[in-house]
Amino acid sequence: MKKILFLLLFTFTFSCSTDIDESKIFLFNNIYFQLENKESFTELTKENTDLYFNLIDNNDLQAPLYKYITGDGYQLFIGLPIATDFNSIKNSISDESIVSGSLDDKSSRYVYLNFNKDKKNITKYLLEIDKNLVYIILTSDTDEKLSVSEIENITKRIIKE
């Protein structure tokens, strides 16, 4: 009997699917963020969390840092805003160079802003999908705009499954 239980437990353990796609970050409701080849997750620390909140420039915004990703010469922060709405955040990052748009369907919209500050290039991307918000901030190590921060490159990395 013990051998049968052991055999069943062994079979069950190794037959479970362990296919975890580490190239995608689960956000919510079958929405994912696709990672680039040279990007990797980095542990959330007080230092990178403080940097993220300094980049938000809005002390009232509740957007906890969800993931911190490092790439070749840049850092990418993904926050999931709560207790707020799209227009409130949009108004807080309002700028004459802001770009607004929507993804392929009518249930999503975004705002995009790219600027230089303190010898760094900063991109802010706010996305609303089905009333859920994602706030992406990308900061490079130089004041040059990187291709990874182009609006088309960020938008195509949002995957609906």
Image: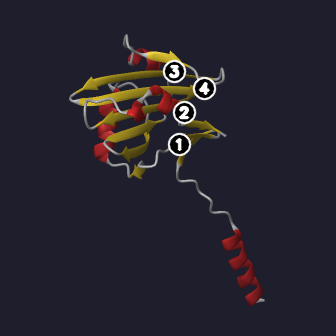
- Please tell me the numbered disc located at residue 156: 2
Give the CA distance from mark 4 to mark 2: 19 Å
Which corner quadrant of the image does residue 120 belong to?
A: top left
Residue furthest toward the top?
A: 96
Of the image marks 3 and 2, the number of the one nearer the N terminus: 3
Mark 4 lies on a secondary structure that is: loop
Residue at 37% from the left image edge and 46% from the top image edge: 70
Give the CA distance from mark 3 to mark 4: 8 Å
Q: x%, y% of residue 143?
A: 25, 30
Q: Mark 3 near mark 2, Cβ–Cβ under 8 Å?
A: no
Q: x%, y% of residue 89?
A: 45, 21
Q: Residues within 10 Å of mark 4 (few under 14, many from 20)?
A: few
**Circle 3 is placed at which residue position?**
86
Q: Residues within 10 Å of mark 3 (few under 14, many from 20)?
A: some
Residue type beneath disc 4:
Lys
Give the CA distance from mark 2 to mark 1: 8 Å
Q: Mark 2 near mark 1, Cβ–Cβ under 8 Å?
A: yes
Mark 2 lies on a secondary structure that is: loop
Residue type beneath disc 3:
Phe
Which corner quadrant of the image does residue 102 belong to?
A: top right
Of residues 119 and 59, which is closer to you in this image? 119
- Please tell me the numbered disc located at residue 131: 4
- Please tell me the numbered disc located at residue 34: 1
Of the image marks 2 and 1, the number of the one nearer the N terminus: 1
